[in-house]
Structures are given as C-alpha cells and as structure tokens.
C-alpha cells in the first residue's frame, strides 16, 4: 500500500484546497475528531487511500512532534500534488480559524478600554475545563499503568519546580530514556504501508529542520530583530510539541508571556476563544502573533507566528515519510515514545495548574463555573463550541 497515485487519478491544486477549506470551516471537536473527518472525506468519499494506509499515516503523524491532524492533511496533499499539494491542503485547513483568531486579536485591543471583561473571563474559565478534559482523556490513554503514571507525575513535578521551556524539554528527554529502559514496546501490526517519497527531498527537509533550530536562535540574539525572535520562538514550539493540540499551550506560554509580548490574561482569553473554532488548535499562534506588541501591523505578526509554528510539521512529514516503516519496526523507539507520551501528560497537568487555573479561577463562582463546564465536556459530551459560548455568557452574568 502506498500514498502514491497514478498521475491520472490525482486531484488538481484548486480541488485539494477546496476540500481542505471545507474541512477547516466545519471540523469542530479537536484533533481526534479531525482525524475522523479526514478519514470520512479522503478514505470513504474520495478514495485517495485505503484504511490500512490511513491508519499507518495517522500512526506516523502521532509519532512525530507537531499537530497530528494537520500533518495527516499535509501528507495527503503531498500524495496528490507533491509539495504544492501539501501547501494547498495546509492553507485550506488552517485559513478559516487563523483569520478568525487574527480578527479576535484586533477586537481584543478595542475591548480592553471598555472595561466589560466578563465574557473574556468566561473564556479563561472555559480554558480550565478544556485543558482538564485533555489531561483526563490523555491520562487514560497514555498512562494506563503505574509506571507511566509515575512518569507523568515526575514530569509535572519537574516543570512546576523549575518553570520554563528547558524543564519541559528535560522532562521529555528523561522520560524517553527511562521509557526505553523500563517500558515495553506496544504491539504492532505485521503489515506495513510503503510510504514512497524522494530521499533527496527527505534529506533536505531534515537539514532545514535541524538547521533552523540552530541558526534561528543565533540570528535572533545577534540581531535583536523582533520578527526574527518571534519566528524563532514559534518555530521551536512547533518543533518540540509531542501530542499536538493542547500540549502546545505551556511551550507557547513560556515563549510569549515572560517576554512581555502578551499578558497571561490575554493569552488565556485567546486560548479559550480557539476552542470554539473549527480547524487546527495551532491557529492559536496567529492570535498570539497578532496580539503581540512588537510589530506595527498585527496581522503580519499573526502570519509570522502561524508559518513558524507549522513549518516544522511540514519538514518533519517530508523527512519521515520514506523511513517510517523502518523506524516503527524498532521496539526501542516505540518504548521511548511511550515514555515521551507519559511526560506530555505531566507537562500538560502542570500547565493546568499554572498558568491556567491560577490565572482564571479566583473565586468560588469561578470554580463552580469551571466544574460545570468540565462536566458538560466530559460527562455530557457537549461540543466545545457550545461549552465556550455558555462559559462566556455565564462569565458576563457572574461579573
């Protein structure tokens, strides 16, 4: 099985863009739901690939750092029209939510002077419930035994004791090493899909991925250029996010809040707003870039941040596709990834306390609203869109 198709069966770029634009405008529910939407559209309806190839592709994108659902979409676009197809797929899937988030950043600047912040506070409380739900679900899936639960707790303690991106990276590296030595490798299907791709393009993608990680920090520090510093920060965040989605929150917060680019309050308000939108949660970066204070045109900051945080996803997919079958055969790699996944749960657990809970919950009424929104998400399975709207309205009523 393969992601490659005969030339005559391939879609044109406009068709690829339109298909993903529809999904980017309608796919509510977060990364897991996005994978279901993608399967329905491209396995069942369009027949771009079969179920086995799709399952293998999802496994690859969950193995790599970055937003898994966006990486699946990029790979599907690559299978149709190469690099241009991957770009068309990403643009279609990302543009709707990115445009709304940039517009929200502009609107927030005008709202700050009005003093009417009740609904913004409601968005922050909604973020508490959304991240608590993510910890709940990821913990059940990724920490099913005492060993991995201990990895998660250890990672949370490390991050809480030494706040910062360095502690988060250390937690991931340590957990990978302990996972390699202490955890069993997951069972794996015996059949493999042959993901074809250019080895030259793959090597070039790996060279760029590593090169940017080395060169961007040096350039940002030596020049002091704000746009370059922003690109560096968001590129590193996109490169180090295992688990995608909500896990980007603590990394981004450490990059933008301590530097004074955005306040904790505005950070959480934008994160809460992002839950109400379809498409990838990484579009939150467009809001952060647009709401930052260092560029004369906010939309330019939004574009820089958006491109920077998604660029590693492109490079990693291009670099990994030809080698995935060989990697997944190695038990040590699968065991190490189990350790990394447990650490990711711990990092998100630490972020749930600080900054999310500490910034959003100040009174008994705030805590009560957080409990209600959590129950709506977890037990009543209400769509995040309606939960966010409910929390914003309740925030106005309680202020």
Image: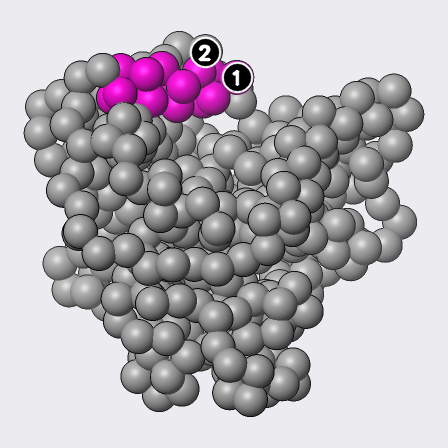
Q: How is the image coloured?
A: one colour
Using the rendered image of the protein, determine whether residue 310 is visible from the camera's viewpoint: no
Query: Who's the residue at 68% across and 43% down the image?
Result: 204
Kindly indicate whether the residue at mark 2 contacts the one at mark 1 (C-beta within 8 angstroms): yes
1 or 2: mark nearer the eye: 1
User: Badge 1: how crowded within 10 Å, few (<14), some, or many (20+)?
Assistant: few
Q: CA distance from mark 1 to mark 2?
A: 8 Å
Q: Nearer the viewer, residue 297 or 108?
A: 297
Q: Position of residue 39 (x, y in %)?
A: 33, 73
User: Please, what is the dominant secondary structure of the magenta stretch?
Assistant: helix
Query: Who's the residue at 81% across and 27% down the image?
Result: 220
Name of the residue lying farthest toward the left? 145
Q: Quadrant of residue 333?
A: top left
Q: Position of residue 272 (x, y in %)?
A: 46, 53
Residue, disc 1: 166
Q: Position of residue 145 (x, y in %)?
A: 9, 29
Residue, disc 2: 162
Query: Who's the residue at 70% across and 39% down the image?
Result: 208
Q: Quarter of the image containing the N terminus? A: bottom left
Q: Is residue 178 magenta?
A: yes
């Amino acid at each position: 099985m393969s992601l490659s198709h005969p030339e005559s069966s391939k879609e044109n770029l406009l068709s690829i863009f339109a298909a993903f634009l529809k999904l980017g405008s309608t796919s509510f529910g977060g990364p897991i739901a996005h994978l279901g939407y993608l399967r329905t559209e491209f396995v069942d309806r369009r027949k771009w690939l079969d179920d086995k190839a799709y399952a293998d592709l999802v496994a690859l994108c969950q193995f790599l750092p970055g937003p898994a659902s966006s990486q699946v979409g990029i790979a599907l676009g690559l299978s149709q029209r190469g690099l241009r197809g991957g770009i068309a797929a990403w643009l279609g899937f990302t543009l709707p939510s990115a445009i709304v988030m940039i517009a929200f950043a502009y609107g927030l600047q005008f709202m700050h002077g009005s003093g009417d912040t009740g609904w913004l506070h409601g968005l922050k409380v909604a973020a508490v419930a959304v991240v608590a739900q993510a910890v709940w679900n990821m913990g059940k899936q990724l920490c099913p035994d005492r060993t991995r639960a201990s990895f998660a707790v250890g990672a949370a303690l490390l991050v809480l004791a030494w706040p910062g991106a360095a502690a988060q990276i250390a937690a991931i590296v340590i957990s990978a090493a302990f996972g390699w030595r202490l955890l069993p490798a997951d069972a794996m299907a015996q059949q493999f899909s042959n993901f074809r791709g250019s080895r030259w393009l793959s090597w070039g993608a790996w060279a760029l991925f590593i090169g940017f990680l080395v060169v961007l920090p040096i350039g940002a520090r030596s020049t002091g250029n704000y746009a370059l510093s922003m690109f560096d920060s968001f590129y590193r965040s996109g490169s180090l996010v295992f688990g995608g989605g909500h896990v980007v929150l603590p990394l981004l917060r450490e990059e933008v809040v301590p530097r004074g680019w955005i306040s904790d309050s505005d950070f959480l308000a934008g994160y809460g707003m992002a839950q109400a939108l379809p498409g990838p949660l990484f579009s939150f970066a467009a809001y952060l870039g647009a709401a930052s204070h260092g560029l004369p045109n906010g939309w330019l900051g939004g574009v820089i941040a958006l491109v920077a945080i998604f660029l590693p996803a492109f490079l990693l997919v291009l670099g990994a596709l030809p080698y995935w079958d060989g990697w997944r055969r190695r038990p040590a790699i699968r065991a190490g990834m189990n350790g990394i996944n447990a650490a990711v749960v711990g990092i998100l657990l630490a972020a749930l306390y600080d900054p999310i809970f500490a910034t959003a919950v100040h009174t008994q009424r705030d805590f009560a609203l957080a409990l209600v929104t959590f129950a709506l998400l977890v037990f009543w399975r209400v769509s995040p869109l309606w939960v966010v709207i409910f929390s914003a309205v309740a925030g106005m009523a309680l202020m």
